[in-house]
């Protein structure tokens, strides 16, 4: 069955497809067309989700708790990783006080509408994804 996407959905689909073609080992679902992608990770302290996002003016990688998890439970699992993430990534802002926001965000500014930036965007996201996974899976 053919998917009918809005122009924004098609644009996002095209980016994630570009990313997956450039980095075939990356866990990007086929036909993905949303702004944020959440990848489950089983860390030594429990299950979390690693987020990859494309916004109009930046791309970002961040961590959130498991689906449906209260922020306090997620923080208990994520706090032990903060120092290692800071060491691997440099200073990154933490929004631990707000349960609706991401934890330990890394972001890079790009004009994401300019497709000539997509190689660099995909490379940046993939590089950060690998660092987050390496640190969180220790």
Image (cartoon, rainbow, N blue to C red):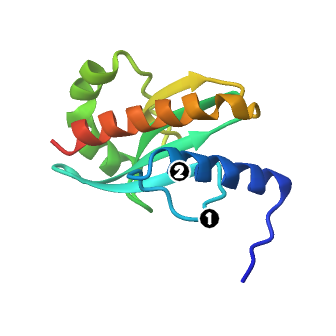
Which quadrant does the C terminus fall into? top left
Residue at (75, 49) in percent of width and height: 11
Q: Is residue 112 visible?
A: no
Q: Is residue 8 left or right of residue 78?
A: right
Which quadrant does the N terminus fall into? bottom right
Nearer to us in this view, 91 or 59: 59
- Where residue 135 appears, x then y in whole percent? 23, 36
Residue farthest to the bottom, as pictured: 1
Q: How many marks?
A: 2
Residue at (60, 53) in percent of width and height: 17
Note whether 117 is above or below 130 in the view shown. Answer: above
- Where residue 86 appears, x then y in whole percent? 29, 21
Q: Earlier in the sequence, mark 1 or mark 2?
A: 2
Where residue 32 sits, quadrant-wise, is: bottom right
Q: Which numbered tag is attached to residue 21?
A: 2
Badge 1 element: loop
Q: Is residue 19 left or right of residue 68?
A: right
Disc 1 versus disc 2: nearer the observer: 2
Q: Is residue 1 visible?
A: yes
Residue at (24, 19) in percent of width and height: 87
Would you name the residue on which mark 1 appears? 31
Where residue 129 sits, quadrant-wise, is: top left
């Amino acid at each position: 069955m053919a998917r009918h996407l809005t122009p924004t959905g098609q644009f996002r689909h095209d980016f994630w497809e570009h990313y997956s073609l450039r980095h075939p080992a990356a866990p990007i679902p086929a036909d993905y067309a949303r702004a944020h992608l959440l990848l489950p990770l089983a860390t030594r302290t429990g299950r979390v989700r690693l987020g990859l996002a494309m916004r109009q003016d930046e791309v970002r990688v961040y961590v959130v708790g498991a689906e449906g998890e209260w922020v306090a439970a997620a923080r208990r699992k994520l706090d032990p990783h903060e120092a290692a993430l800071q060491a691997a990534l440099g200073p990154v802002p933490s929004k631990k006080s707000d349960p609706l926001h991401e934890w330990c965000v890394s972001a890079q500014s790009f004009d994401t509408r300019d497709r000539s930036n997509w190689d660099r965007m995909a490379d940046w996201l993939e590089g950060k994804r690998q660092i987050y996974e390496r640190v969180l899976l220790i």
